[in-house]
Image: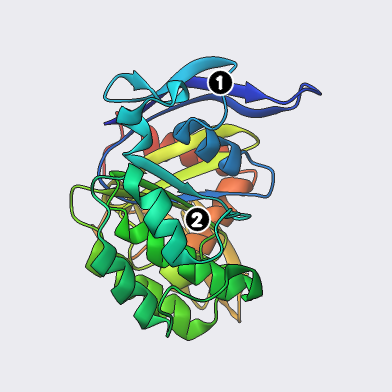
Amino acid sequence: MLNINNVSFYYRKGFMAVDDACADIGSGIYLLLGENGAGKTTLLHLISGLLFPKSGSCSLDEVDTSLRSPYTTERIFFVADDFDCPFATINELARRHGLFYPTFNYEMMRANLADYGMDGSEKLRAMSLGTRRKAFIAYSLALGVDYLLLDEPTNGMDISSKKIMLKQIGRCVSDDQCIIISTHNVHDLQTMFDHLMLMRRGRLRISMPVADILERAAFVSSPSPVPGAIFQEPEGGRFKAIIPNEQHIDTDIDYPLFYSAMMSEAGDSFIEFLTSKNIQL
């Protein structure tokens, strides 16, 4: 289990990038949402032990990740949005870096690369941003780590490559593993998330299973304003709304609408509605 225990972090000028974040993260695929500057990337750095909390701790099975011990570093891997590589090719990265990951599957990496029409011998510096990102994703999925952290993984990818990435995650990730994906491009991957984390102004406001959210709230569309909606907004001549799921309606999360609700004046009351232990539907 990965535990985020009252973690706070600020930069030299005193800007509070992460403020008293708490969460318990197990297996599954997590979406990490938040506006630009909300602290998402900083939180991923803290989880992976690449930044040191000013207070609190991130721990994996009670081992502090900031210690960068082999126990945590071989089980957590972070692919940053600006990921850089000191090696010339992915094959060289696999030979030299993959040694530190006991669960690394070389054949899985080769299969992932082949999906994108690569064999791993291509020069990374000659690749476009999107192609380089595909190569890193192909490699990172083959590491088999317990916690894979991906920051904006689909940036620079075309539509077909995003579909391939979805297929690879389904093929490569076991039920015991966890992927945390920080992205604004929720439409690309929205069918796969089973947990949702949302940050706002450095605060981790929500961390809960998608199923729990849908048990309490339904996402509907109507040609006219929806009475009793927790939040709603017009779009394309209709009203998209979030309502209490009193009738146990089977809906999917509308992630853009969820995000709009959280960023609106109704955000605090929506959070209280979702997290209250006394709610009755």
On residue 224, which mark appears? Answer: none
Among all residues in the image, which is located at the extreme left? 175
Give the residue pinned by disc 2.
258
**Residue 238 in picture, x, y percent from top left:** 55, 77
| Closer-to-camera residue (83/161) | 83
Relative to 100, say whether 152 is above or below.
below
Which quadrant would the N terminus be assigned to in this image?
top left
Which quadrant would the C terminus be assigned to in this image?
top left
Label 1 to label 2: alpha-carbon separation: 29 Å
Q: Relative to residue 191, is residue 131 drawn left or right? A: right
Callout 1 crowding tier (Cα within 10 Å): few <14, some 14–19, many ≥20? many
Q: Residue at x 25, y 64 (%)?
A: 172
**Could you tell which of marks 1 and 2 lies nearer the N-terminus?**
1
**Residue 40 in picture, x, y percent from top left:** 57, 42
Q: Residue at x 39, y 67 (%)?
A: 138
**Residue 269 in picture, x, y percent from top left:** 52, 37
Give the residue pinned by disc 1.
53
